[in-house]
Amino acid sequence: MNGNAHNFDQIIAFIREGESFTLLSHISPDGDTLGSALALMHLLDKLGKKAEIICSNPVPKIYSYMPGSSRVTMPETAVGYASVISVDCADVARFGRAIRFFEQAERTASIDHHITNPGFAGINLVAPEASATAEIVCELYKRMDMPVDEAAAACIYTGIVTDTGNLSYSNTTPAALRIIADFVEKKLVDITEINRKIYRTVAYEKTRVQGFVMSNIRLECGGDVGIGILTQGQLHSYGASNEDCEGIVDCVRDIDCVKIGVFIREGADGSFKVSLRSKGVGDVGRIAIVHGGGGHEKAAGYTAHEALSTVVSDIVREAEAELKRCAEAE
Ligand SMILES: [Mn+2]
């Protein structure tokens, strides 16, 4: 990792100088933000420090196998220590209700791999070349001469595989694969078991709600843009939760003709969460940023507060314009 040796040193000093730490994971937590926070918590435990992890949403069931996951607390029951480290959060809006812990902290640090991270903390270790934030945390273990044990390896492995589409996206770096090769060689992770838990275990409700969205898919722009839509009423009629909607946007993207996949899900407050995926042609991060969201070229999202028909017509128009821009740039 190029990282920045300087910032690694700063983070290491930050950790060594503190006694008690609050680690912040982002809203709608994924395998990387949780895996990174948990791996960092295990590191702090070993150093004899006090640590808590705060997340505005509960740990999704599929990630509950990660050692220490029961210690992830909601903002309402958290302590809030003097030293705060955010993990995998590209901006402060990602903290959700946990933002006050960042604001009240005496010292703040951020460990992240999102290129859009503006460096909002006191110390910022942002390494866009890392496949996952978990890869940076692994490097931290190395630079602190701390051995990665089985518990930490399961968390780091989870962060890397979930952020790389199970080691298949273009961000799957040789460095990421070397970390995993090392874990496998040392028998620190059971990749078959973890993959079964993450990718081969689907809730009945999720299967049905996914089937509903996929069988009602709308193809726009001659099939270039695929749109899946799910209202709160539909979500509830399947007994499904927001967590069950994870991955639907990837199924939309995977349709053979689709270049930009969209999944629009109504939230409990009536807003719409718009998730975007591209196969490489069309930068969906550009679309999301216009709407106050974020992400990158191939995966991005934003929240819309307009009526559903407007949300749909906006995204169709913007996706078409983005594909046109790419075609012209070629
Ligand atoms: Mn990540």
Image (cartoon, helix red, strand yellow):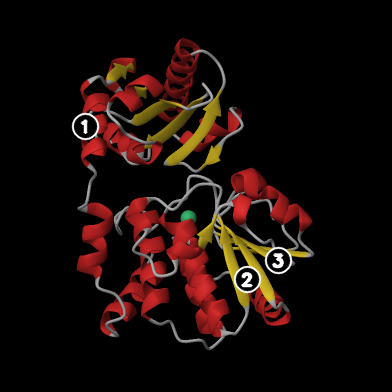
Distance from Cα at disc 1 to Cα at disc 3: 42 Å
Residue 293 sits in which quadrant? top right
Q: Could you tell me if the residues under marks 1 and 2 are in contact, i.e. CB atoms within 8 Å?
A: no
Viewer-nearest residue: 33 or 60: 60
Mark 1 element type: helix
Residue appearing at x 31%, y 80% in the figure: 188
| Disc 1: which residue | 208
Viewer-nearest residue: 101 or 278: 101
Residue 21: x percent and y percent? 65, 70
**Label 1 neighbourhood size at 10 Å, few (<14), some (14-19), many (20+)?**
some
Query: Of the numbered discs in the image, which one, if any, rests on residue 4?
Result: 2
Residue appearing at x 59%, y 66% in the figure: 52
Residue appearing at x 34%, y 16% in the figure: 221
Residue appearing at x 76%, y 53% in the figure: 103
Amino acid at pointer 2? Asn
Residue 111 sits in which quadrant? bottom right
* Tag in front: 3 or 2: 3
| Disc 3: which residue | 81
**Label 2 neighbourhood size at 10 Å, few (<14), some (14-19), many (20+)?**
few
